[in-house]
Image (cartoon, grey):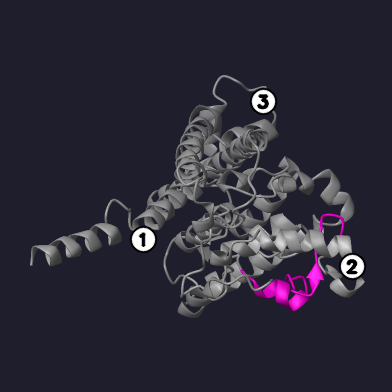
Amino acid sequence: MKTLEKASDALLDKDWGAKIPDYLTKGTFSIAVFFMSLTMRGDWLMFLAHYWRSQAPLPNSSLLSDQINDGNQTETELAMWFNEKFAGFWTMYFPVATFVSYLFFFGIGGYLHFTYYVGKRDSPEEWKCQPNKWLSSREEIHEILVGWFSVTLGSALSAALASWVVNGGQTTLYYDFGEHGLLWTALQVPLVFSVTDYITYWHHRVYHMPFLYKHFHKLHHTYKQPTAFSVTAIHPVEFLNIQAIYVAPMFTVPMFAPFYCAMLLYIYYHGIIDHSGITFKALWWQPWQPDCIFHDNHHQYFHVNFGFNIEFWDHFHGTIRQKDKIYREDIFWGKGKDITEASHEELAADMNQREDENPLAYSENKNKYL
């Protein structure tokens, strides 16, 4: 009897022991990513500004202008307009936005990095998309610094939008649920999300044309094994371009403000997930969303898999990675090179790349490209 009890205890120790359940690790990671996506560009402040605007009447523009320009009659009309529409930018919105963005960028980003890239460095085959390859220390510092600059830029943009919204600036977002009818209420998110994602697909693909890639987008591809910090480590010109796409619905499409904010949060959340380098897969309710390995392949093979949140665009345009093609940084246009046209050296190099991929990142735990 005692022997059976000991055997049972040993089995329990083996199965449960001190090992943290996988759902706890991934759940904590998801929560951390959620807060990082909400804060790292300062968008939380813009979301809050929309809430304030929905709860209070718009400020009296003429009265506000009189208050701003009291005792100073020499200001130009343009300066008066800026002071009116962006009141509080320097004194409140920008300092607060950057402080919170930095706190979460380094805090949550650091947590994710130390949890996986430091704490689990000895077992990359269990979680890493490219378990045999790592960014160098210099590249890690580089992506943090570049990403930090973009976070600052994003915070400034969000602070400007927040002050614009609070001070009564024009926006197409609305705050009464169902204001434009129930049909539009139901369709607006899938339609705007799809159109926005399709535009970002082409934005990304255009930046992979030789000239733009060399002078702008190549900076982002410095990180062949991306981490969560890589998501904002892009050239400032490209960063502002893509932010303009995400901000555009605020001024062009009537959307229920909470829906718009939730859509942005979803996009930013998966931007971090897709750059994490970790073998996360889309959930059952996300048939449109590619797994993390999809964008990790983009960093590993460069000119392929241009989509972000909808994998269909690459299938439709023939830029999805294919088993009978090879891809490299010097093979542009997203179509790859047929293996029948490749030399033995090219095939060997490509096979080495394929063998570096983690089977756990794919469905049924099998690398479909080998």
* Residue 184 included in the magenta stretch of the image: no
Secondary structure of the residue carrying numbered label 3: loop
Label 1 crowd (10 A; few <14 / some 14-19 / many >=20): few
Pick whichever of labels 1 and 2 is earlier in the sequence. 1
Residue 188 sits in quarter: bottom right
- Is 133 rendered above or below residue 97? below
Q: Is residue 291 visible?
A: yes
Give the distance between the C-alpha atoms of the residues marked 2 and 3, in whole angstroms: 67 Å
Residue 216 placed where, x, y %? 80, 45
* Residue 314 included in the magenta stretch of the image: yes
Which residue is labeled 3 in the image?
75
Q: Which mark is residue 23?
A: 1
Amino acid type of the residue that numbered disc 2 sits on in the rendered structure: Ala
30 or 78, which lies in front? 30
Q: Which mark is residue 232?
A: none
Task: Answer left or right for 331 relative to 16.
Answer: right
Number of the front mark, 1 or 2: 2
Amino acid type of the residue that numbered disc 3 sits on in the rendered structure: Glu
Give the distance between the C-alpha atoms of the residues marked 1 and 3, in whole angstroms: 59 Å
Numbered range of the magenta stretch: 310-331
Residue 329 placed where, x, y %? 82, 55
Quadrant (top left, top right, bottom left, bottom right) of the C terminus: bottom right
Number of the front mark, 2 or 3: 2
Give the distance between the C-alpha atoms of the residues marked 1 and 2, in whole angstroms: 43 Å
Are the residues at dot 2 and dot 3 in contact (C-beta closer than 8 Å)?
Answer: no
Residue 139 placed where, x, y %? 67, 37
Are the residues at dot 1 and dot 2 in contact (C-beta closer than 8 Å)?
Answer: no
Which residue is labeled 2 in the image?
342
Amino acid type of the residue that numbered disc 1 sits on in the rendered structure: Tyr
